[in-house]
Image (cartoon, helix red, strand yellow):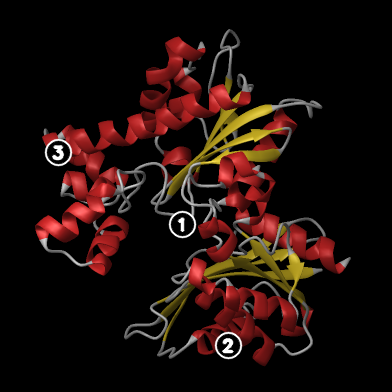
Amino acid sequence: MKILVLNCGSSSLKYQLIDMSNEEVLCVGLVERIGIEGSVLKQEKDGVEGKLIVEQPMKNHQDAIKLVLDAVVDPQYGGVKDIKEVEAVGHRVVHGGEKFAGSVLITDEVKAALEECIELAPLHNPANIMGIEACEAILPGVPMVGVFDTAFHQTLEPKCYIYPIPYKFYTDYKVRKYGAHGTSHYYVSQRVIEKLGNPEHSKIIVAHLGAGGSLTAIRDGKSINTSMGFTPLAGIMMGTRSGDLDPSIIDYLIEQVGMDMKDVIRMLNKESGLLGVSGVSSDFRDVLAAADEGNERAKLAIDIFFRRVIAYIGRYFIALGGCDAIAFTAGIGENSAYARKEILSLVSEALGIVIDDDANENGDGERLITKPESKIKVYVIPTNEELVIARDTKRLLNL
């Protein structure tokens, strides 16, 4: 049983073909610059040297998905001989609002509900819908499942998701905390629970640190609070996003600086975070390199980033009433031993964490990076959102 997993962005498309009989990834690819000059598809297959590269115009997602379906049957880099071997498609959907507390089989009613959620994720949901409609056109009759980034956080209680503004804005306009990265937080927390021996009760903090970043407090496998909010702009400092800030700054920038609202929101989303403070880059690696060369603003950006992360670790430690384990995942969380060590050093005395420097710096893949005497276990867990999507697709379709 082979499932194609699609993650459609506004001008990009990530995909994997997975054999669910053994959860083997048959091929993995990325399509970039959809609808833009220079469209390109790149696909790799484990154990095969090199990659398939297709450079040709793709005016929309339907064009891109046609090329994906050709690529997955490529004799050298593909995963199947005939596209009929693909039994289902799993789609990542960024925002399900309050309508979806779990993954669902895609129907006309579900698509209509996704349209209603566009206003909550105007950058992401339209692309997700385009991917679904493109598959319907090219693969008629092949069942599809939608897996929502927000669904894992539907277990939050009102005291954690209602904002302290007039209640009518929630009832009339659905203004509330929704969170994001839910599929990643779910996968990583489940892996940690397994590593802890599948206890009946567990208290876990997951730090998904990448270009976008969020932390989630997870009790007994359920999200009880998360750092992103109504949109992915809230929470910790990120690559280009500010994270939490005083809302009055927005009014000040409009009234005193002369910016308009759209410019301010674009600045907070696209020009802030590590990029805004450092003036160097949105990429943590570039900022760290600049800091090592003596760039003071780069050093400041990294210091702010670390302190924004530990503020949420401390907040969630208290909310959980203690903590069994912390897990680092995503680009920075998985790959930067320096970031992990510095973040943990800032909370080690308060939380009794004793880091194992050798495991942190020299290990690979899933691993424990604290010593036996540490009061809290700390893990590195590479995220695997695609596998979660494939598993949910298989489960819902009873494949």
Residue 48 in view of the camera: no
Amino acid, disc 2: Lys
State yes or no: discs 3 and 1 in contact (Cβ < 8 Å).
no
* Mark 1: few/some/many CA within 10 Å (<14, 14-19, 20+): some
Q: Considering only vertical position in the picture, is 116 above or below 47? A: below
Residue 328 in view of the camera: yes
Residue highlighted by disc 1? 231
Q: Considering only vertical position in the picture, is 356 above or below 39? A: above
Determine the secondary structure under disc 3. helix
Mark 3 or 2, which is nearer the eye?
A: 3
Disc 3 to disc 2, how far (Cα)?
46 Å
On residue 297, which mark appears? 3
Q: Is residue 257 left or right of residue 387?
A: left
The picture places residue 16, in percent across and down from the top left corner, at: 61, 66
Q: Residue at x 11, y 63 (%)?
A: 258
The picture places residue 368, in percent across and down from the top left corner, at: 58, 25
Question: Among all residues in the image, which is located at the extreme top?
Answer: 373
Amino acid, disc 3: Arg
Q: Residue 22 occupies which quadrant of the picture?
A: bottom right
Amino acid, disc 1: Thr
Q: Residue at x 70, y 40 (%)?
A: 222
* Mark 3: few/some/many CA within 10 Å (<14, 14-19, 20+): some
Disc 3 to disc 1, how far (Cα)?
27 Å
Residue highlighted by disc 2? 66
Q: Is residue 288 left or right of residue 374?
A: left
Disc 1 to disc 2, how far (Cα)?
32 Å
Mark sitting earlier along the chain (3/2): 2
The picture places residue 293, in percent across and down from the top left corner, at: 13, 35
The picture places residue 352, in percent across and down from the top left corner, at: 51, 10
Mark 3 or 1, which is nearer the eye?
A: 1
